Image (tube, coloured by chain):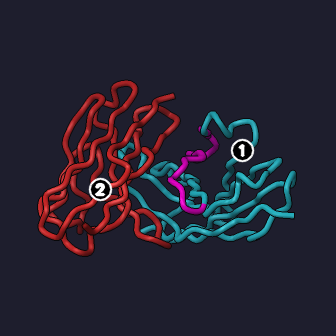
Amino acid sequence: QVQLQESGPGLVKPSETLSLTCTVSGDSVNSGSYHWSWIRQPPGKGLEWIGYIIYPGNANYNPSLKSRVTISVDTSKSQFSLKLTSVTTADTAVYYCASYFVGGGGRGYWGQGTLVTVSS
Amino acid sequence: DIQMTQSPSTLSASVGDRVTITCRASQSLDNWLAWYQQKPGRAPKVLIYKGSSLESGVPSRFSGSGSGTEFTLTISSLQSDDFATYYCQQYRSQSYTFGQGTKLEIK
């Protein structure tokens, strides 16, 4: 079973870059079996899919965020990462990493989530 | 983009009730749809995948049906543990999309 743990700053200033890392255990990030994904949830609101990457580097992003988002994989650290540039207060949310089985139609594993607040 | 419309946004029901939540897609998904349950402060948990397949360990009172553009999640007899928020998510396109969510409340 895959286990996922998000990490990164809990506070980011407006206009700066939000950077989060998801550490993977129980399987390899260079497995082509998963979409390594990021999802977020603003306080009191619904879920928003951010994007995913399939090793070695095929990524797909939410069109509404595409110009600001990069998801990458670091096999040496068994991690995948999210970078979101030029953040505003609207980017304040709980950020989840998840691993969806390719072709699994929604099956997979989720991290516990980490709250990132954008504030000066 | 595929747009997902979930209804109702809020549902009040009692223990023992049968409830149904609907998710409509702006274009055909075949059966590439999942249903999630989320409780406050917790990550979502998958209940149904590929439209109607029950995830391992999920009680059989949960069922999913539908294909194409209209899907339903049914809870046959509500238990107290089922009061939560439910989301659908499509996997048909390369840009996955969630529905807006349905909050299931105790009547």
**Which of the two marks, 2 or 1, is nearer to us in this view?**
2
Measured along the vertical axis of the image, is residue B71 above or below residue A77? above
Whether residue B97 is visible, yes or no, is: yes
Looking at the picture, tell me which residue is in the foreground, B13 or A103: B13
Colour of chain A in the image: cyan
Name the quarter where the N terminus of chain A is drawn: bottom left
Quarter of the image for residue B67 reads top left
Looking at the image, which residue is at 68% across and 57% down?
A: A81
Residue A19 location (% of width, % of height): 76, 59
Badge 2: residue crowd in 10 Å (few <14, some 14–19, many ≥20):
some
Residue at the disc numbered 2: B11
Residue B92 location (% of width, % of height): 40, 33
Q: Chain of mark 1?
A: A
Looking at the image, which residue is at 59% across and 62% down?
A: A43
Q: Is residue A117 left or right of residue A55?
A: right
Q: Which mark is residue A69?
A: 1
Instruction: Give the SS element for disc 2.
Output: strand
Q: Is residue A60 magenta?
A: yes
Badge 1: residue crowd in 10 Å (few <14, some 14–19, many ≥20):
many
Residue B43 location (% of width, % of height): 47, 67
Magenta residues, start to end = A43-61
Residue B95 location (% of width, % of height): 52, 36
- The reply to whether the C-beta atoms of the residues labelled 2 and 1 are less than 8 Å apart is no
Instruction: Give the SS element for disc 1.
Output: strand
